[in-house]
């Protein structure tokens, strides 16, 4: 009979763990963060290698024109990095707003079921 008591402990623990995992969007947050990191790394590679036309600053033979293109390339890189960060923040804000909209509905449903 004692072994039967120990069997319920892992089951209860798993139930608790599943409720915590489903309550918090760990996977969604991880995917969002990983996508942002990959986008930033890709943008950095484009900048370092000068793959896109906006990052090419070595095409010109004139040094003053090369410096001007280098400044423009840096400005373009900063703009792209800021856009990537902004997109992530907007996605997080939208998901938080959706959660806030669903929580009051869930709470009202629970309060109605408790009153019955």
Image: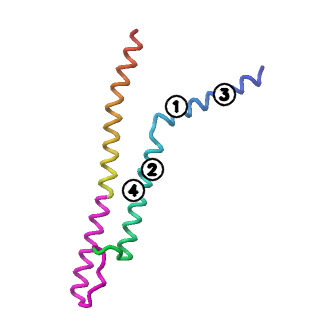
Give how far apart the Cα atoms at labels 3 and 1 are.
Answer: 15 Å
Of callouts 3 and 1, which one flags the residue occurring earlier in the amino acid sequence? 3
**Up-down relation of residue 30 to residue 106 (above or below):** below
Magenta segment: 54-83
Rendered image quadrant of residue 6: top right
Tell whether 59 sits left or right of 1.
left
Give how far apart the Cα atoms at labels 1 and 4 are.
Answer: 28 Å
* Secondary structure state at the residue bearing disc 1: helix
Rendered image quadrant of residue 76: bottom left
Q: Residue furthest bottom?
A: 61
- Which residue was labeled with disc 1? 19
- Which residue was labeled with disc 3? 9
The mark found on residue 31 in the picture is 2
Tell whether 32 sits left or right of 72.
right
Of callouts 2 and 1, which one flags the residue occurring earlier in the amino acid sequence? 1
- Which residue was labeled with disc 4? 36
């Amino acid at each position: 009979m004692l072994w039967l008591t120990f069997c319920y402990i892992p089951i209860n623990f798993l139930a608790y763990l599943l409720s915590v995992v489903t309550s918090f969007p760990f996977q969604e947050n991880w995917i969002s963060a990983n996508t942002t990191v990959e986008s930033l790394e890709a943008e950095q590679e484009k900048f370092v290698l000068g793959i896109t036309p906006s990052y090419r600053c070595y095409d010109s033979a004139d040094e003053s024109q090369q410096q001007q293109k280098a400044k423009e390339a840096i400005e373009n890189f900063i703009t792209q990095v800021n856009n990537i960060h902004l997109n992530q923040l907007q996605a997080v804000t939208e998901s938080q707003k959706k959660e806030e909209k669903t929580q009051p509905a869930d709470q009202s449903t629970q309060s109605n079921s408790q009153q019955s």
